[in-house]
Amino acid sequence: MLEVKDGQCGLCAHFGETHAPTAQLTKIRQQHEAPETLLDDCGHPRHASLHLKVTPIAKCDGFEPAKAA
Ligand code: SF4
């Protein structure tokens, strides 16, 4: 498992934003840990049309904190 820190995709509201929330995503936001192999969509308006896929530990300046469910 990878530790996911503030400012990284796994804790960003845009991570996986293009689909319904999954139990895995909720768990990442609660526990700040994610599997090494996970990739998901970035739904940020400036990335979505490019179908950018990111890992939970990637990051960019478009970060917006997700609500931990
Ligand atoms: S690439 Fe940027 S906007 Fe997209 S999920 Fe990661 S931090 Fe959020």
Image: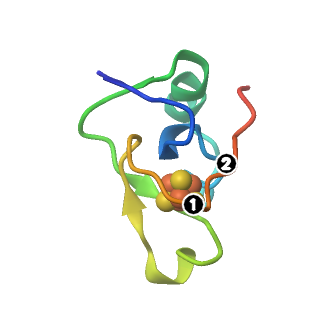
Q: Position of residue 34 (x, y in %)?
A: 39, 28
> What residue occupies the far front of the structure in this picture?
61
State the residue at coordinates (61%, 19%): 30
Q: Amino acid at mark 1?
A: Asp
Cβ of mark 1 under 8 Å from ligand 1: the answer is yes
Name the residue that disc number 1 marks.
61
Cβ of mark 2 under 8 Å from ligand 1: the answer is yes
Q: Earlier in the sequence, mark 1 or mark 2?
A: 2
Measure the alpha-carbon separation of dots 1 and 2. 13 Å
Question: The N terminus lies in which quarter of the figure?
Answer: top left
Q: Residue 13 got which mark?
A: 2
Q: Residue 69 got which mark?
A: none
Q: Position of residue 6 (x, y in %)?
A: 56, 33
Question: Above or below — where is 2 with respect to 42?
Answer: above
Task: Say which element carries label 1.
Answer: loop
Residue 37 as seen in the image, left or right of residue 16: left
Q: Amino acid at mark 2?
A: Ala
